Image (cartoon, rainbow, N blue to C red):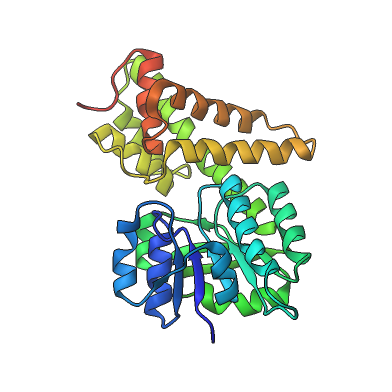
Amino acid sequence: MSKPIGFIGASGLMGHGMAKHLLAKGHGLVLHVNTRPQRVADLLAAGATLAESRADMAAECELVFLCVTGSPQVQESVGALLEGRRALPEPRPPLMIVDCSTSEPAGSRQMREWCAALDAVFIDAPLTRTPVEAEAGRLNVMVGAEPEDFARLEPILRCFAENVFHAGGPGAGHIVKLLNNFVSQAICTATAEAFAVGKKAGVDPRRLVEVVSAGGANSGLFQAMAKTLDGDLTGLVFELDNARKDIRYYTHLAEDLAVPTVVGEGVHQSLVLASALGHGRKFVPSLVEAQEQLAGTQIVPR
């Protein structure tokens, strides 16, 4: 691209690796950092620059990536970018804002409307996989965009993504991401509960792991949860409170569609309960610790 790429959220666990690979592939990069500035010191040393404000970034860049916590942070960032864009003389240069956060579809619709009013494009392009894959440039991205916008964006996404999926039109990326996270967290919460019931019944949960590992219910997520039996609570580097937020977004989506979500509500409440028990800032495998408290048994060796 002739202009540098803007990036909001490069100090985060996922954003840092994404920004690193954009730089490595020869793209100029302008960062806006609110917290943990030490996390971007290597990016600045590699040639990235800092924007004084997000409004300034909108004047300097034609493409801006967002990788922030959720919909409130996305709304704040988009508002600041559009404030800067509104101050530009007409005709304004092109601007594409790409939201790689996990956001609520209803909020994304509002962001698209805000952007369209100022001749900007808002694209939803949420991620899967973990910070490990982000640093390796092997993320998965699901994109909700018109075909022509997807065609422009795809080569840039491939700088940090192994797999890029065109999920459908605007908004489809965030919907598919929420479906994916619901299925993922259903596996994690079910595994933690099964470990607790098995242990309480006098069965070594490792016997369950042996059986599941040899059958169709096996998965990478199940194996990440199984590591808790050896005392490893870091098999899935994803904060439990973020998982809780994502499943809340999923249940909101289903409620807006008048679709019952019996399992979804159960998964959400399992995460809410684990958070209430003090595990929200830990990783998702700490669901097993929450089940220990509820069942009055020990599963994780200490």
Question: In the image shown, does 44 or 180 lie closer to the viewer?
Answer: 44
Q: Is residue 170 left or right of residue 18?
A: right
Count of marks overlaid on the render = 0
Q: State which quarter of the image contains the C terminus.
A: top left
- Residue pictured at 45% horizontal, 66% vertical: 31
Asked which quadrant contains residue 95, the reply is bottom right
| Residue at 51% in and 43% down | 184
In the picture, which quadrant includes the N terminus? bottom right
Residue 89 image point, x, y percent: 71, 77
With respect to residue 9, does 43 lie above or below? below
Q: Position of residue 192 (x, y in %)?
A: 41, 29
144 or 210: nearer the viewer: 144
Q: Is residue 97 visible?
A: yes
Tell me: 225 left or right of 96: left
Left or right, 197 with respect to 94, comes to left
Vertical relation: 191 (above or below) 151: above
Q: Quadrant of residue 207?
A: top left
Q: Residue furthest bottom?
A: 2
Residue 283, quarter of picture: top left
Front-most of residues 202 and 28: 28
Q: Is residue 144 visible?
A: no
Find the residue positioned furthest to the left. 302
Give the residue at x 35% y 63%: 135
Residue plotted at (58% across, 56% down): 77
Look at the picture and state if 80 lies above or below 187: below
Q: Position of residue 291 (x, y in %)?
A: 40, 22
